[in-house]
Amino acid sequence: MQSRDLDIFKTWFTGYSQTFYTDDTEDNKNIEVKVRHTSYVCENAVLIAREEQMTDNNILIAETAALLHDIGRFAQYATYKTFRDNISVNHGRLGAEILREKKVLEGIAPREQELIINTVQFHNTFEVPAFEDEQKILFVRLIRDADKLDIWRVFAEYFHGAEDVHASAVGLGLPDLPEYSQKVLSCLHKKTLATLSDLKTLNDFKLTQLSWVFDLNFRPSFRLLAERNLIHRIASTLPQTEEIAGALAVVEQFVSEKSGLKRR
């Protein structure tokens, strides 16, 4: 890949995403969330890849995968008016289909196309598939980290922002009640991922997001997470109970050890 190839893909992305803007303010707000998200995921991917001392070519592949990782979101929203895969369509698979059908990547080497499309298709799985191809695993892990880092930003802003400025499709439609699930909370102590099927309240979703730290893969990802204070920004909107404080301490200690930075 060459940098000019990436420039071509950026131009294509801009033109493609613009076709989904409408005369509806709410629609445009939701589309803009994904355009902005994509920009930040690209920045995260490049930061991680550079700090991991990846080759220049692999950094270009990583940034292209980041640019296109959520390309399925636009058609998903246009059809279903939601970003919830469980009630619409798997946006990773849809994105891979769009890239193949529109031959977006045909100007680069077949191997590079394969790695990018595979990353788009599998970036949103619960766990990284057990590919025999180590490069496929590498890029999926990298984009998952870059994606999570910005999803935390999106929801930190969402949880702290005024309700009238929220993009309607960002939330999961969960009731904003003081309750939370002991099952979800226990995942933080076990250092395991909580599953969306266990969520009953918005607090459960916040705790689930905190469990995502146990799925991060690269030291730079932990450093960026710590430096941006994302865990605190989300945790500060949870009920201030002793058991949540205890679970949060487990999360913070894990991030501190993985990042090499001292706890705040």
Image (cartoon, rainbow, N blue to C red):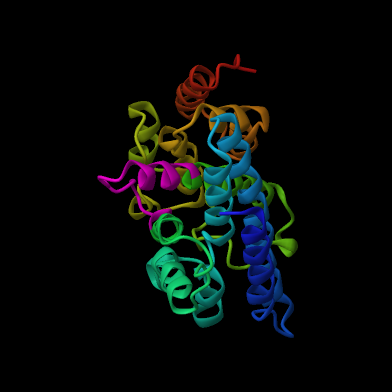
Number of residue marks: 0
Question: Which is nearer the eye, 260 or 134?
Answer: 134
In reply to whether residue 80 is colored magenta, the answer given is no
Residue lying at 63% horizontally and 63% vertically, measured from the top left:
34
Residue 32 higher or lower than 136, as above or below? below
Q: Is residue 71 above or below residue 178?
A: below
The image position of residue 29, as x and y in percent, is 70, 69
- Which of the pair 41/254 is nearer the observer? 41
Q: Residue at x 58, y 50 (%)?
A: 63
Q: Residue 89's spot in the image, x, y percent?
A: 40, 72
The image shows residue 241 at horizontal and vertical percentages of 52, 29
- Magenta stretch: give its range: 122-142
Q: Residue at x 58, y 33 (%)?
A: 231
Whether residue 54 is visible: yes
Is residue 180 shown to the viewer in this render? no
Is the N terminus in the top left, top right, bottom left or bottom right quadrant?
bottom right
Residue situated in front as seen by the camera: 19 or 46 = 46
Q: Quadrant of the C terminus?
A: top right
Task: Work out which residue is located at the far bottom of the displayed protein and give it.
Answer: 23
Above or below, 254 against 12 in this view is above
**Residue 109: x %, y % from top left:** 46, 60
Residue 130: in magenta span: yes
Q: Is residue 174 above or below residue 228?
A: below
Residue 184's quadrant in the figure? top left
